[in-house]
Image: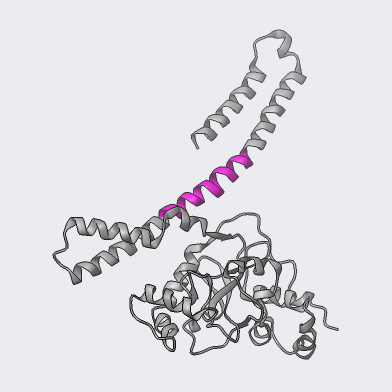
Amino acid sequence: MIGLIYFIGLIFYLTYRCFRIESSVLRSDLSFRLSGAICASLLWFLYLPLEIIRGHLFYNQMDYDRVIYREIVEDQIDEAVAESYAKYPYMSDEKEAELREKLRKGIGTLDDALNDCVYFSKSITKSQLAGLICYHFSKSSASQNQLEERYEEISPMSFVEKCVSNLPELTDRIKEDLSFLNLGEGYTSIRYNTRSNFADLLGFHTLKSGLTFYGVEVKSKETIPFYMIVYYDGWELRAFVPPHNLYNKETVEPFGVDEDADLVFLEDSLQESCFKSTMYKSYAKRLSVHRLEAQIEQTVNYLPLSGESPKFGWDDIEVK
């Protein structure tokens, strides 16, 4: 900000000197004065957008993220320490410091968390998001029969919830966003599951931040469902899988792909013995939809860049 003020002052000073120069020869030279003023104005108009982009949109946003995340981490650590004090009221200062250090390592470093952040730049309605999903769905060969039968009598949101089950493979960008999970073939998305751990976050939702997303469970015949959302980032559809979820963090695969590896991971995570028949349910009981929603809000951040409303939607679908 100080650099910006200095630069503005310099521009005004140079412009003023161009018009107030004492030399009688240059004073009468109108072209010199005009060219000086034009050059100063051009420098100003070139500098201003760069300063806004560099300083306001990126630097301040990242600073804000760091402050907010640090507060979240410290709150989590304070809660855990308070619980430990309740169990062990005579814990020494050294033990507390050791506990806090372990908790910080367990939660993860600040830089790692910020690297996981993704951004959206355009707030859209649930209907707009549903229309864009439907439009991409209409490009698949298997969609035409469903569209022909229901296009005239159903809304885009209802169509997505009842008919679209190929979200993991809907677009190349969504497949890229899910590539870290090593998904094979045969994965489908499920909207309706009243017994799901994620039941309250399935379907279309809009958060206070302005993020509109469509939440689904994703599974194959052999695997346990995990949760993902599809949202519009201002340019294209994206997928996000919250880390607080039902998948193996060690093998980075859905539960059920390798049950032996799942058993080892779950016993380490739960700090208790698990049986294959109940291990997934035991882990699922530890999940909280409130924490899941908080992860979405903390990771998918609003950043007002040059995003646009979706160019395609329900009305652009061509039904044969």
Span highlighted in magenta in the image: 48-67
Picture coordinates of residue 208, whole percent (x, y): 50, 68
Task: Answer whether residue 61 is magenta in the image.
Answer: yes
Q: Is residue 288 visible?
A: no
**Colouring of the image:** one colour
Nearer to us in this view, 2 or 277:
277
As drawn, the residue found furthest toward the left would be 90
Residue 22 image offset from top left, x and y in percent: 65, 10
Among all residues in the image, which is located at the extreme front?
Answer: 260
The structure residue drawn at horizontal position 15% and vertical position 67%, both measured from the top left corner, is 89
Q: Main secondary structure of the magenta part?
A: helix
Kindly tell me whether residue 186 is visible in this rendering.
yes
What is the x, y in percent for residue 282?
39, 83
Q: Examine the image and state in which quarter residue 319 appears.
A: bottom right
Compared with 45, 26 (above or below) is above
**Count of residue discs:** 0
Q: From the viewer's perspective, is residue 83 above or below residue 145?
A: above
Residue drawn 46% across the image and 58% down it: 113
In the image shown, does 153 or 99 lie closer to the viewer? 99
Left or right relative to 257: residue 146? right
Image height of 89 relative to 150, above or below: above
Residue at 49 percent of width and 51 percent of height: 62
Indicate the quadrant containing the C terminus: top left, top right, bottom left or bottom right.
Answer: bottom right
Would you say residue 20 sits in the magenta stretch?
no
In front of the other: 78 or 222: 222
